[in-house]
Image: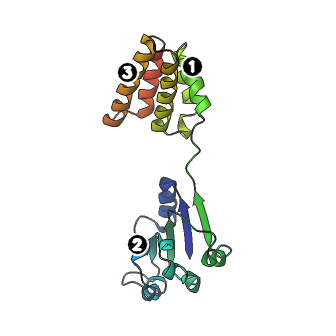
Amino acid sequence: MIRIYYGDDRVKINEQIKKVLGENYEVMDGPELMPADLPSIFMGGSLFADKRAILIRDLGENKEVFEKLPEYLNTPHEVVLFETKLDKRTTTYKALKDKIEIKEFVMPANINAGLVFDIFKTAKINGKKAVQMLEQIENEQDPYMFLGLLVSQALKDFSFRQGTKEKRVLIELSKLDIAMKSTSLQPFSLLKSFLLQVSSL
């Protein structure tokens, strides 16, 4: 069976690949393959098993080979194509889409900048409440992106009022940035610690 997984959420794609192929599988780079390689990949057996588990990366970049895929739909092996991008306009895609599993894995949407503003605004008055707000969304967010949005909000504050507090917040954010990149502590723990101290800066 042939499956195509594509998208920018590499973590989810790798999890799905392991579910389908297990822990041990052959890995091939699609751009390096030739049409003559396909019969042995899709139809050939191995010394150890009749059924093989095969991962092919970015075969879509190799148009000459990719367009041959419909010829191998009856492969006895488990084959997963991991595509960074998939052109749905191609004849090959149209020929495959109703015959094999094609699944997109997309990174969760970035946090709403307005929500970060609310958390940052709350932290200036009540750090504990700001932490509670962050805890409600942290499982769905990237901590480094959250930090970047915090910095942008702090810079906006500083552009309106270049006071001592605004300068201290920016200094602490720069320290937080370094800490998140250089320590083994959980990023969200560091973010929460920052939110707790904003009101006293």
Q: Mark 3 or mark 2: name the one nearer the start of the chain.
A: 2
Residue under label 1, please give it: 121
Residue 171 is tagged as 3
- In the image, residue 75 sits, relative to residue 126, either above or below, namely below
- In the image, residue 26 sits, relative to residue 169, either above or below, namely below
Measured Cα–Cα span from mark 1 to mark 3? 17 Å
Residue 29 is tagged as 2
Q: Nearer the viewer, mark 1 or mark 3?
A: 3
The kind of residue tagged 2 is Asp
Quarter of the image where one finds residue 188: top left
Q: Position of residue 14 (x, y in %)?
A: 47, 59
The kind of residue tagged 1 is Lys
Q: Position of residue 66 (x, y in %)?
A: 52, 78
Residue 18 is tagged as none
Measured Cα–Cα span from mark 3 to mark 2? 46 Å
* Mark 1 surroundings within 10 Å by alpha-carbon count, few (fewer than 14), some (14 through 19), many (20 or more): some
Q: Who is closer to the viewer here, 46 or 148?
A: 148
* Mark 2 surroundings within 10 Å by alpha-carbon count, few (fewer than 14), some (14 through 19), many (20 or more): some
Question: Can residue 100 be seen in this snapshot?
Answer: yes
